[in-house]
């Protein structure tokens, strides 16, 4: 796949951030998004370089443009 999204919990963080990251990088996944609901944040890895944490992120999935507003994923205080 070109895009994988993982919901990260304290119990899965090591597996999601290290083990799965390495597998997805090796397999050529273009975008890997880690969602941290407890911390109300997300990390995007594009081409497996960590991108600056942004509230809105635009993707190009084989010519199909997509945009995610991470503000909509979390209730802001």
Image (cartoon, grey):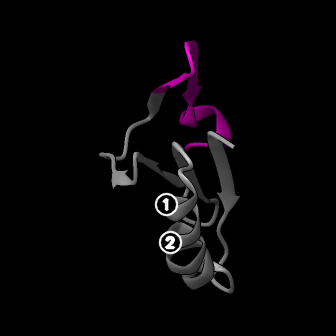
Examine the image and state in which quarter residue 54 appears: top left
Q: Secondary structure at mark 1?
A: helix
- Residue 22 x, y percent position in the rendering: 50, 71
Residue occupied by mark 1: 25
Q: Is residue 63 magenta?
A: yes
Q: Which residues are magenta?
A: 58-77
Residue at the front extreme of this rendering: 27
Residue occupied by mark 2: 22
Left or right of residue 61: residue 49? left
Cα separation between marks 1 and 2: 5 Å
Identified at 64% across, 32% down, the residue is: 72
- Residue 44 x, y percent position in the rendering: 46, 48
40 above or below 1? Answer: below
Nearest to the observer: residue 21 or residue 17: 21
44 above or below 19? Answer: above
Say the numbered circle drawn on residue 69.
none
């Amino acid at each position: 796949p070109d895009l994988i999204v993982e919901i990260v919990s304290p119990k899965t963080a090591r597996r999601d951030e290290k083990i799965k990251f390495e597998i997805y990088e090796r397999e050529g996944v273009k975008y890997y998004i880690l969602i941290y609901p407890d911390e109300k944040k997300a990390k995007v890895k594009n081409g497996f370089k960590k991108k600056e944490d942004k509230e809105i992120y635009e993707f190009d999935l084989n010519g199909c443009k997509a945009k995610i507003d991470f503000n909509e994923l979390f209730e802001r205080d």
